[in-house]
Structures are given as structure tokens and as C-alpha cells.
Amino acid sequence: MNIKLIFPVLLLFFFAGYTYSQQGSLQVNQDEKITELLQIKSNLSKENKISDGYTIQLYYGELKEANSVIRDYNRSVSIWSATIEYETPNYKVWVGNYSTRLEADRALLEIQKNFPNAFVLRPERRN
């Protein structure tokens, strides 16, 4: 091949990527409240406020004893989050937020080592 022909062909291949490539930018216009709403929904799900799932109940009774049970749980197991729920006139200690009964039963086996009276329940949906 002729050397005069090779140089322009190589130059053409080198700049071909730049001449035919596309440059683009994307701008997403999103309401700031969407991020806030997603965070609120995430927190409500963690707290078992909007879930149709299962939880484990450790205790049902007076607040003083409920606080004692939750302290004992946090010292011994504390793999899943525990909360105190109020239902007139008693307090409940609930652990976890499980989407399936199988997940709840597996957690129950671990929790019952320290809390033999614990049981799985499906809480009513709160408004």
C-alpha cells in the first residue's frame, strides 16, 4: 500500500469515534418530597406500621415489665429490632418485621432460647 494512503486512513479511523459519537446529558426533575416520602415509608415498614407481615411477641402487660423485657432482649439477642406497642390498657413487646411466616418461625426458634413464651403473630394493620 502506498504510505500516502495509510496516513489519511489511520487519521480517519482515529477521529471517527469523535465525529460520530454522541454526547448527552440527562436532567431529572423530581419533587423533593419524593425522597422524604420514601424515607417515611421505609421507617413505617421497619416499625411494622404498614406491613401485612408477621412479628414476634415477647410480652404483654405493664409498662415497667415491658421495659425490663426489652432491655433483656437487647442484651441477649438484639438481632432484630424490638419495640414496645401500646394497646389499651397493656403494653406489648414486639420483635422484628417479617414478610413471611417462615422467616418469623426461624427467628422465633432463636428467640425462644431466651424467651420461651414468645410467639409469632400477625398484627392488625393500623391506620
Image (spheres, rainbow, N blue to C red):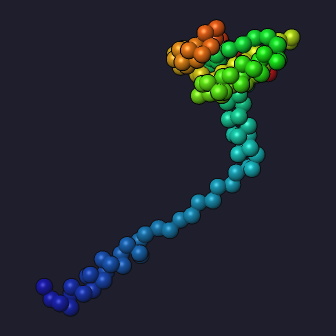
Report the front residue among 9 and 81: 81
Q: Quadrant of the N terminus?
A: bottom left
Determine whether, in the image, residue 12 is placed left or right of residue 67. left
In the image, taking residue 102 as reference, residue 95 lies left or right, namely right
Q: Position of residue 124 (x, y in %)?
A: 72, 14
Q: Would residue 3 appear left or right of 114 to someone viewing this image? A: left
Q: Quadrant of residue 47?
A: top right
The answer, for residue 48, to whether it is visible in the render is no
- x then y, percent, for residue 26: 59, 60
Provide residue 56's location: percent of width, then percent of height: 64, 16
Q: Picture quarter containing residue 19?
A: bottom left
Instruction: Quarter of the image for the C terminus: give it.
Output: top right
Farthest residue in the bottom direction? 4
- Front residue (pair 24, 51): 51
Total marks placed: 0
Residue shown at the point (20%, 91%) measured from the top left = 4
Q: Is residue 39 above or below residue 74?
A: below
From this view, report whether residue 49 is shown above or below residue 40. Answer: above
Task: Give residue 118's quadrant in the image.
Answer: top right
Residue closer to the observer: 78 or 19: 78
- The residue sitting at 69% across, 54% down in the picture is 29
Residue placed most toward the observer, 115 or 103: 115
Residue at (70, 40) in percent of width and height: 39
* Percent x, y of residue 30: 70, 51
Residue 28 in sight from this viewpoint: yes
